[in-house]
Image: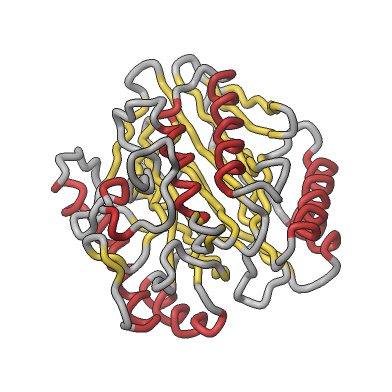
Amino acid sequence: MNDCRYICRSLRESQADFSAMVRSLLNRYQPKNVPVRLVFFGDVTDNVRYREELDIIRKEADIHFGDKLPVISYVAQKPLDGSGLVMEAHELKIFQGETVEYKSLWTNFYITVTSSHVKHLFLGGVMSDNLDESFSVQSYNVFDIVEKILQIENMPVHSIVRQWNYIEQITAFDGEHQHYQDFNDARSFFYNYSQWPEGYPAATGIGMACGGIVVDINAVYADDASIKIDAIDNGWQVAAHAYSQGVLFGEKDPRFQSRTTPKFERAKRVKQEKYEIVYVSGTAAIRGEESLLEVGIEKQTQATIENIDYLISEENIRRQGILFFGSSYRLKSCRVYLKDISLMENARVIVEKLYSDVESIYLLADVCRDELLIEIEGIASV
């Protein structure tokens, strides 16, 4: 096997004027392959300023890239390494015979990479026009946009293989309605359009300080057998989409008989030709379906990494009857989401010890359960 076709790396900029930070990151960025996604992480806490800074990012990126603009997202999560702004760049190695096209629907930009039998789609920064609407309305608006773009590209809903879901104040309530539960209800409604023969996408549902609902998506669809896709479960954890009502919170959507579960797999493997990628979903210190309580950041960090390592282990993959193609998988890059700034150093010591060769970003973000202090996601390959 070769290395990963989908490459993720990050750049950091020290505190400065916001426009200057964005320009500096873009000017320093030297892509080795086709950049398909840029995710900016910054310390912003109100929606007015968030909109202003998002407009600056889009304007500067448009000037920098011209008609070959990667999809852009801005996530209101404070970088915890002292940086003023962090940019995570996702690149794709292009095969011979593939065509890269830059498209848009209204103000939503996306990229397709197409060959005779396979189409990849990269969509980012999908959000509602009105951040003052309820989180339920915003969620349905976001998925309406995703649905329309997939329809335009003749790609089924189940072609989504990786989804990032950024949710303002994720565990907060509007009356009886929890933000995350409202989002999960809208996602379930949208996903009901598909049968999901290869399992749900890998996904992260994570909090941010402001910005409403923001969704990023990678999708891939083939009309032959040139792509092999597998959902990877974790034998140590209940699948998130099989959670009981006891670990869900908030009033249910009237469209459903009960609160809906988070519809994602613990990981998703995509193999094309000699290249493999494993998208590792947001992972926390959960065993079965219960959080590890009152154990502190050190043990939660250790348990989270143990969950990831077992998830992508040969033992776990073979346990599910999935064909193991060769060498073991290892994280190449990860994001570490921490609930409080004070947790940073203790978590970082453990992460850097166990993942010394993994490029990591540390971000301030609420996790989807109040008792969870840390969540880690990543990209793995052989």
Above or below, 36 against 179 in this view is: above
Colour logic: secondary structure
Q: Residue at x 38, y 38 (%)?
A: 256
Q: Quadrant of residue 167?
A: bottom right
In this orientation, does residue 327 appear?
no
Give the camera-side residue of 381 and 180.
180
Return the residue nearer the eye: 49 or 343.
49
Left or right placement of residue 138 versus residue 251 in this view = right
Q: Position of residue 136 (x, y in %)?
A: 55, 45
On the image, the x and y values in percent for residue 95 come to: 51, 28
Tell me the quarter of the picture where residue 273 sits: top left
Q: Is residue 106 above or below residue 295?
A: above
| 125 on left or right of 332 | right
Q: Position of residue 259 (x, y in %)?
A: 36, 47
Q: Nearer the viewer, residue 69 or 327?
A: 69
Residue at 78% x, 40% y is 65
Residue 323 in sight: yes
- Quadrant placement of the N terminus: top left
Q: Give the residue at x 67% y 41%.
A: 128
Residue that appears at 35% across and 43% down: 268
Q: In the displayed structure, does residue 156 sit left or right of residue 134?
A: left
Q: How many numbered discs?
A: 0
Residue 258 coordinates in the image, percent (x, y): 33, 45
Q: Is residue 85 above or below residue 296?
A: above
